[in-house]
Amino acid sequence: METGLPPPLLLFLGLCGLARFASLAGVANVTLPRPPNLVLLLMDDMGWGDLGVFGHPSKETPNLDQMAAEGMLFSSFYTANPLCSPSRAALLTGRLPIRNGFYTTNAHARNAYTPQDITGGIPDSEWLLPELLKKAGYVSKIVGKWHLGHRPEFHPLRHGFDEWFGSPNCHFGPYDNKVAPNIPIYRDWEMIGRYYEDVKIDHKTGEANLTQMYLQEALDFISTQQASQQPFFLYWAIDATHAPVYASREFLGTSQRGRYGDAVREIDSSVGKILSHLQKLDISNNTLVFFTSDNGAALISAPEQGGSNGPFLCGKQTTFEGGMREPAIAWWPGHVPAGQVSHQLASVMDLFTTSLALAGLQPPSDRQIDGIDLLPVILQGKLIDRPIFYYRGNEMMAIRVGLYKAHYWTWSNSWEQFSKGIDFCPGQNVSGVTTHDQEEHSKLPLLFHLGRDPGEKYPISFASAEYQGVLARISPIVQQHKETLLPGQPQLNVCDKAIMNWAPPGCEKIGKCLKPPSPDPQKCIWPH
C-alpha cells in the first residue's frame, strides 16, 4: 500500500512508534539500544513431525532442536490456510485469507493459490508487515518464494520490501517456454535468470544449490544491516521441502529419510549457521528469530518427497490438524526464557502483530486484524484466550477453542480425485471424518478433544453433557465471527496464460524475454 503521507506525518508516526517501543521495553523488562531485528524463517510444506524436538525418530535436526532448547517451542501453532499462497498472505497482513482476498469463489471450499497463470495477487489495499515496519526505520528483505502474485503490481518491492532474491512462484518445471515459461529468479526489481536454465534443479538426483544461495543471501544481508546499525526484517521463505524436493551435493544421500530428509538436514544446518552468525556479530540479544512452516506436510508426496505431520490427521490441503498445525520455535537469547514449551493457541497471523509490537507500532485500526500480540506469551509465559479458525477457500470448516475442535464441514478431497490416486490422508481413513464428499455438520458439529485425541479419531458423543457444554461455549464465537465477517474481493478466480512469466522485468537485459499468447481470461479450476 502506498502511504501517501507527507514527510512530517511520517516523522510523527515514527516518533510515536519509538515512544511506544520504549514503553514496551520497560514493561517487558527488555533493555535494547533500538527496536529488535526480526528474522522469520518460513519453511515450505514442512510438517509438525519433521523435527527431532517434535518427536521424529531420525533425530536429524540438531540445530533446530537446540534452537528450541534455547528458546520457546509452540505445541499448538497454526497456519491460516492449508495451502501456500493464502497462508503467506495471512502472515504478512495479519488477516485471514477470506479478509485479504486470497481465496476463490469459483467453487465451495476450494484451495486456491498463485500459479503463474493467475491474474490476481496481494491487493494494494492491504498493509503488509514490511510496509508498516518502515515507520520504525526497518530495512526489509525477502529471500526465497514470494507467492503473492507475479505481475508487476504485486512485486514485493511495491509492498514494502527493500530487497528480494528469489522467485514469485514455486520451482515447478522444467517447461518448454512455449506452452509455459520457466519460472524467473529475481534480484530486487528485475529477473536475473530462470529455474532449470540458469539455476539447475536435477529431478533425477535431487541436486540443487538453491538453499546454499538462500543461506548466503541471508548472511550477507544480516552483516550489511549490522554494519549500518539499522533494524532489519529478514523474511527467509525457502522452498527445498516442497516437491520436487532438492538439496545440495553435500547433503544428498545423508538422511535416513531419503531425499526429503536430505532437504531437511540442509535446512537445519542453514538455520544453525544463521543463528551462529547473529551470535558472532553480537546481535543475537537484539534479534527475535521465529521458525515455522506455511502449511502441513504434503502427504500426497510422501514419503520420498513429503514430510511428517506426527500424530495428526491428514496433511496439506485439508483442515484437519495435519494440514494446519505447524512446527514453531521462538528464539531470542536473554529475553525468551530457554527450554520453554507454550501451549498457547497461536497463528502465523500473530507474527504480524507481534512484530509490530516489538517495533513499537500499532496495527492498522481501519480493518479487522486477526493476529494477536504474542509478546506476553513469549516473554512472560502467559496464555491468552482466543479461538483458531480453520478456513478452506471461502468456508470456515472448523474452529478450535481451548482443547476442543469443532468441525462444521469435513472434506479431504473428491471421489473423482481420490480415484486417480490423489490422497491427502494416506493410511488414515476415519469413517465419517475424512469424507470424500463435502459434508456439512453445522447443526451438529463433529467435536474432538485434541488433548485426549490429537489424531481426530474419536468424535465426542452428541448426547454427552461434555458435548452440550462445549458447544454452548463455541457456538456464540462462531456466530459472532460469521455475523461480523467482511470478505475481501477474491483474488484467485481468474487465470490467463497470457500473463504468465513470459517477459518479466529485466528479461531484455539477459535475453530471456518470450512472446506471450493472446489474452484469454478463464475461470480458474480448483479441483480440491
Image (cartoon, rainbow, N blue to C red):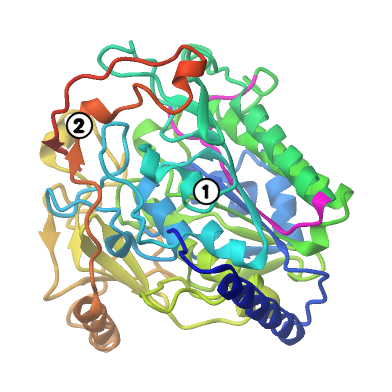
Label 2: few (<14), some (14–19) or many (≥20) C-alpha neighbours in 10 Å: some
Mark 2 and mark 1 lie on one chain; the one further toward the N terminus is: 1
Residue 159: mark in rendering: none
Q: Secondary structure at mark 2?
A: loop
Kindly tell me whether residue 356 is visible in this rendering.
yes
Q: Nearer the viewer, mark 2 or mark 1?
A: 2
Residue at the (81%, 57%) spot, across then down: 284
Compared to residue 26, the image places residue 511 above or below, namely: above
Q: Secondary structure at mark 1?
A: helix
Indicate left or right for 393 with 32 as reference. left
Residue at image mark 1: 49
- Give, as a single range, the part of the protein colored magenta: 228-248
Prevailing SS of the magenta stretch:
loop
From the top left corner, tell me how far across and down residue 445 is, in percent: 19, 72
On the image, which quarter does residue 173 sit in? top left
Residue at image mark 2: 496
On the image, which quarter does residue 147 sit in? top left
- Quadrant location of the N terminus in the rendered image: bottom left
Query: In the image, what residue type sits under mark 1?
Result: Gly
Query: In the image, what residue type sits under mark 2?
Result: Asp
Indicate left or right for 125 with 336 as reference. left
